[in-house]
Amino acid sequence: MDSQEDDLAAQFDKASEYVMNHHETLDQDTLLDMYGYYKRATVGPCNTPKPSWFDFSSKVKWKSWNNCSHLSKPEAMRKYLECLDNVTKDWRSDSNTPINGIFVSSMCTTDQVLLEDQKTVFDWIKEGDLDKLKSKQFDPNCKDDEGLALLHWAADRGDLQIVRYLVEVKKANLNCLDSEGQTPLHYAAACGYPDVVQCLIDAGADSKLTDNDNNTPKDVAENDSVAALFS
């Protein structure tokens, strides 16, 4: 790590510590934005599926993190600092907050960062690594420990290129079910990805299938514009 990276990391640690100690002075929208940047900077791209559509609190936090997945770690750190600077610059002169060392933040996670040789096809999809997918042989209908197929994850991420690759090239099962009886089309609709929804519908995904709560993909659509695609 060079001196500029060291300085950025030190500022990020100082800002994180400030937020932990002064979060009650920050508005919820700011905290939500900063949550996404923090998770991207400390964990990496969003690596969990979207929470149930009726779990609003977890859903908005997931969305904030997922929206930052395209950022690099340094970019996420800078965005975090910019976000805090926009509401207060007091943290920069706060003598009670050290600027060296590693801090335990209220948003810290126990998730581990995987080494490249530890990653699986599911990790490549979560990271949007289409080139890696194309270079490897894999079962397009395999499922992870949570019962999600590759197409569930691609739809959850809204990655149209990977969805198309799995559907058109790898011939993945369009109507595979997770443990809650939801298809990739449920995921794309619930996450609000109209291009992925349309792609799956055009490919022949069954829009009438209901999950364990008797909801069709249209029933769990993120918004009216996505729901209209099922008309």
Image (spheres, rainbow, N blue to C red):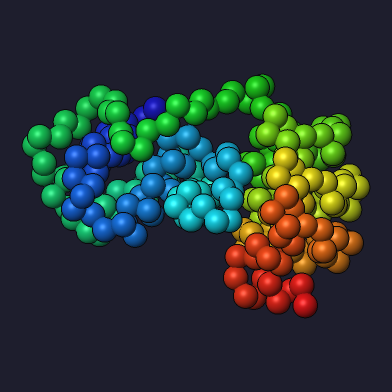
Which of the pair 8/34 is nearer the observer?
34
Q: Quadrant of residue 121?
A: top right
Indicate the position of residue 14 as horizontal and vertical percent values: 23, 37
Residue at the far left in the pictured view: 95
Q: Is residue 191 above or below residue 44?
A: below
Q: How many numbered discs sit on the rendered protein?
A: 0
Q: Position of residue 26 (x, y in %)?
A: 23, 54
**Residue 98 percent across, percent down from the top left:** 16, 31
- Of the pair 48 and 94, the residue shown nearer to us: 48
Q: Residue at x 26, y 58 (%)?
A: 27
Asked whether, in this view, residue 54 is left or right of residue 160, the answer is left
Is residue 106 rendered to the left or right of residue 50? Answer: left
Q: In the figure, 131 relative to 208: above or below? A: above
Question: Can residue 150 be seen here?
Answer: no
> What residue is drawn where x is 74% and y is 53%?
211
Residue positioned 70% across, 77% down in the render: 228
On the question of residue 178 being in view, the answer is yes
Taking the spot 65% from the left edge, 22% from the top edge, the residue there is 118
